[in-house]
Image (tube, coloured by chain):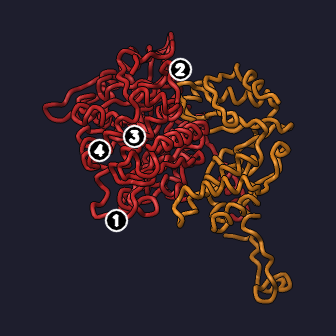
Amino acid sequence: MSKNIDVPKPADIDETKVKYLDSQPVEKVSVLDQNIHSPATPGEKFFPKFQVSPQLEAKADERIAQYPDDQKRSAVLPLLHEVQHHFGFISPESIDWVASKLDISPIKVVEVVTFYPGFRQKAPGRVHFRVCRTLSCAMGGSYELMDKLCELTKIDRSTADGHKDPISVSPCGNYSVEFAECLASCGTAPVCLVNDDFHEDISADKAAGLIDQYKA
Amino acid sequence: MSDIKYLPGKEPHQKEHRLIFKNVDREGWDTSIDTYINDGGYDMLKKAIGMEPNAITGEVKTSGLRGRGGAGFPTGIKWGFIPPTNTKPVYLICNCDESEPGTFKDRYIVHQDPHQLIEGMIISAFAVGAHTAYIYIREEFPEAAITLEKAINEAREKNFLGKNILDSGFDLEIYVHRGAAAYICGEETGLIESLEGKRPYPRIKPPYFPAAMGLYMNPTIVNNVESLCHVVHILRMGGEEYAKLGTPRNSGTRILCVSGDVKNPGYYEVQVGKVTFRELLYDICGGPKDGRTLKAVIPGGSSSKILRCDEKFTIGKGDDAKELEFWDLPLDFDTLAAAGSMAGSGGVIVMDDTRSMSWVLNNITHFYAHESCGQCTPCREGSTWMKKISDRIEAGQATPEDVKTLEEVAYQIDGKTVCAFGEASAWPVEAMIDKFRDELTAQTSEDNNFKSAERLEQEKFLATVQS
């Protein structure tokens, strides 16, 4: 029944293109390079480049001390929060630093970063809007709020993907938006988080006023 | 102690009975320890450290307090599960991952009254013998994390925390641990994995009951914020007196969070089982918006099964059985369970006649597809599958057969996963189809022939290989 399928016959294989482990050194591909999704965004210019300062070290040590001595791995979330708070997002270099700080392999940090929606691997805008998408807020008009925010900040959300790439950044880099799941304030829907500030009852007609509060 | 006055426009409804929310929206109230102490705060801690730890657990058992996080498991009994022969360190974890859609009670406690939670935690830690406690707070409460850390430092300065608390010989440290926006961390074993710095894949029970094998494989008690706050009031009132609040087997007060299509959505602390849906939604919340009628209610967070407002239920068994209209159901754990749903976390979501049920279903399936941790196949694949089918129904591209498939998928997840997320994602779908099948089917058509992108690719490929 099948016809047009080309199955390579052994004779067709070009021996020169086959890599053998013992004959040629295999190029070392870092786990991080393959798994880190961090395209540059216009928002990057608003965040300092990752670097380890004495203050960061001290903050990290303080967090690590909150867990038993043999359970340093517990501090992976707190350390990533420190990094994201100061540098805007989790870069590959910061993952290496967190891993070395906790004496664990980088993959154990990567698996955490890629799981939790709270950690982002690309720079958001200077002002990051997280609009609640879940039932009560959706009934209260959060989709309309999102549309309005995008319209006012010229953000194109068409390529956003809730799982893999939830953040959309404006061309100027000042603003970014993301849909969040239930922010636990359903009685005052629709709600959103702007950076670390929480705003209630933000119907679409209040979007312009909200953006104004964060003008540089 | 001064008379309690509330902010203008924020007075509790007369049907409310405030214990936990006593200080929420209170005039002149702030989060400082002095304000709390001036109001009699930390007096119960002083009483507790003079008691035998077992006596405190005994009071909590007598009070009949049932966990306010969702499952409604008796708190005192949970504490009693720590093996009596245990020699390992015991941990107490406060679950402040409040992320069940429709629930917004813990938010106000941690933002406005952090010391009540801390006092409850110290007493509870003393009762279970924990010397380290963590508050696992969701990442979306950044301000509350700061408020709590400040409150912990204040308490430490007064020697309510730290070494040799108030000369009792009891040591305790509380730390705040921030999550990172994952719903599954509200599941206690997922929370523990997350606290250990891993992906929050829930552990299977048995054998991993946290009270025996929890954080770092040590005995661990995980309690909801509201449950831990109740401990303070149980100690103040005495277990027996506390148990007189509410109804038998459903004692105390609980905070109901009402959202959606009512005039006055908000948080209302009432005696458990003393308020019916009619009283809650009409008397307290002001009824539906003008010109509308109420259609359906999700009674305990989005995972609980939806109830139709025109339904009738048979509650009780044998001679005690009685038929109740939806409106006359009291909101307690047992009645709602008998009505086929659950009291869950107290998140009441109300929908009126303008809401399309396929749209509601679609919103809910999107949530669960996003939040499934991916550990168990039925849930990982099923939640996404349910989302895709509900997308199709909502878009008018589905066939009546799709509704049946959706129902089958839901029942294939239910009961086949490590944690209760499987049920949480399947129940709303099962109930929605069970109760609004006609409405959903009306949006489908036999003529539809929806083909996914994968299906189109497949057909293209098959056409090339078939002769």
Label 3 to label 1: alpha-carbon separation = 24 Å
Label 2 to label 1: alpha-carbon separation = 59 Å
Q: Which residue is mark 2?
A: B354
Which element is circle 2 on? loop
Q: Which residue is mark 3?
A: B120
Q: Is residue B364 left or right of residue B249?
A: right
Label disc, if present, on residue B87 of the rendered structure: 1
Sequence-earlier tag: 4 or 1: 4
The amino acid type found where label 2 is placed reads Thr
Foreground of the two, B270 or B221 = B221
Percent across and percent down for residue A8 are 77, 78
Q: Residue A87, can we see it? A: yes
Chain ID for orange: A
* Residue B245 quadrant: top left
**Dot 3: chain letter:** B
Which element is circle 4 on? loop
The C terminus of chain B sits in image quarter: bottom right
